[in-house]
Image: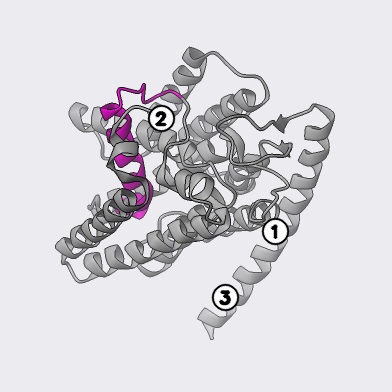
């Protein structure tokens, strides 16, 4: 009976938060129209029409609003980091900022995130985590290039973490997961369509990556395992493989581009962008199942094998569809 009651209360809470974020999103659309916060198509774009930028502003609000209501003082450092990185990303959506300002704020936010999670005192481990989290945040931002991919992939990731928080070890209170999922569902309504009403913008993709890094780090501390990084494995495979290809072509890896595999499939190969987004989200869901099974069965090699299988399939398909010349030769 109690699980049933919890399910009912969760659904009611999800509906309430959904309504709240619909209202916030509609207000933001009005503001974006007034101040011309619009994404205009260019040679790297996967869209051809003017679209509102920054719709993902509800993601940081989805964590900060219940945080303010519950007054979780232990999250002060994390919330400051999230607020800072979200504000600077939103400003970058509105007016292109100097890279040094953006990177400095991002670095300070990551430092606050690491400071907010206990049990990390070894300097080399802190340096490694700082580099890893910074890389994940930027990779998540680079992967936000077609309709639906950030929304669907994030739903899978946050949904998996929500399930783990209820079945394995509590990561954060359920209210935060429910609020985050509600914001993702609202954003999906406006974004997961052929002609999107809005894009996540840097504020959406960067803040979501920051939140996910915090959740993964907290889960790793509580379980004593870093296997959970594989919950971002599909994005990791595409990002690392693309970086290797760009280095082989002697291209600056930090320069904006559209040479990820998902971009090739949606833009050059002509697959429906929504199908590609669903494909990436579904692949990550399958990998998540392998990771959870491996952890619960105490067979970590299963998770490694699962990642290797996806890497092998990804490599074969990418070589088959794009070819070695396009991947490794300057063009």
Q: Quarter of the image holding residue 120?
A: top left
Earlier sequence position, callout 3 versus callout 2:
3
Q: CA distance from mark 2 to mark 1?
A: 29 Å
Q: Nearer the viewer, mark 3 or mark 2?
A: 2
Select label 3 or label 1 by which is in front.
1
- Mark 3 and mark 1 residues within 8 Å of each other at the beta carbon: no
Residue toward you, 255 or 99:
255
Residue at 47% in and 13% down: 100
The one nearer the camera, 19 or 93, is 93
| Position in image of residue 40 (x %, y %) | 69, 31
Label 1 crowd (10 A; few <14 / some 14-19 / many >=20) = many
The residue indicated by pointer 1 is: 18
| Label 2 SS | helix
The quarter in which the C terminus is drawn is: top left
Instruction: Read off the residue under disc 2.
Output: 110
Determine crowd level at label 3: few under 14, some 14-19, many 20+ residues with C-alpha closer than 10 A. few
Q: Where residue 306 sits in the image (x, y, percent)? A: 24, 62
Q: Is residue 200 visible?
A: yes
Q: Which mark is residue 7?
A: 3
Magenta residues span 230-255
Inter-mark Cα distance, 3 to 2 = 34 Å
Residue density around tag 2, few if under 14, some if 14–19, many if 20 or more, within 10 Å: many
* Residue 305 coordinates in the image, percent (x, y): 19, 61
| Dominant secondary structure (helix, strand or loop) of the stretch shown in magenta | helix
Q: Is residue 182 left or right of residue 100?
A: right
Q: Establish if 260 lies above or below 149.
A: above
Q: Is residue 150 left or right of residue 51?
A: left
State the CA–CA distance, disc 3 to disc 1: 16 Å
Residue lying farthest to the bottom in this orientation = 1
């Amino acid at each position: 009976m109690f699980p049933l009651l919890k399910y009912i209360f969760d659904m009611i809470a999800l509906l309430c938060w959904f309504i709240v974020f619909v209202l916030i999103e509609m207000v933001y659309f009005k503001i974006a129209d007034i101040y011309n916060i619009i994404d205009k198509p260019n040679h790297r774009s996967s869209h051809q029409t003017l679209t509102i930028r920054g719709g993902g502003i509800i993601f940081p609000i989805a964590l900060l609003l219940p945080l303010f209501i519950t007054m979780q003082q232990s999250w002060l450092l994390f919330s400051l980091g999230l607020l800072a990185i979200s504000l600077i990303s939103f400003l970058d959506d509105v007016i292109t900022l100097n890279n040094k300002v953006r990177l400095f704020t991002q670095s300070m936010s990551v430092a606050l995130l690491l400071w907010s999670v206990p049990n990390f005192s070894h300097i080399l481990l802190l340096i490694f985590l700082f580099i890893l989290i910074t890389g994940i945040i930027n990779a998540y931002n680079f992967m936000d290039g077609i309709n639906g991919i950030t929304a669907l992939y994030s739903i899978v990731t946050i949904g998996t973490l929500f399930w783990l928080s209820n079945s394995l070890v509590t990561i954060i209170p359920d209210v935060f997961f429910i609020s985050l999922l509600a914001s993702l569902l609202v954003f999906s309504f406006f974004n997961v369509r052929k002609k999107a009403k809005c894009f996540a913008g840097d504020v959406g993709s960067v803040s979501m990556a920051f939140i996910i890094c915090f959740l993964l780090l907290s889960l790793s501390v509580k379980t004593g395992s870093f296997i959970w990084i594989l919950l971002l494995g599909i994005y990791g495979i595409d990002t690392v493989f693309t970086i290797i290809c760009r280095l082989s072509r002697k291209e600056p890896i930090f320069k904006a581009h559209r040479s990820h595999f998902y971009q090739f499939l949606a833009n050059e190969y002509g697959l429906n962008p929504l199908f590609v987004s669903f494909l990436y989200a579904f692949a990550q869901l399958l990998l998540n199942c392998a990771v959870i099974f491996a952890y619960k069965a105490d067979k970590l090699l299963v998770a490694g094998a699962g990642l290797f299988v996806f890497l092998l399939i990804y490599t074969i398909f990418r070589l088959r569809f794009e070819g070695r010349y396009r991947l490794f030769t300057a063009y």
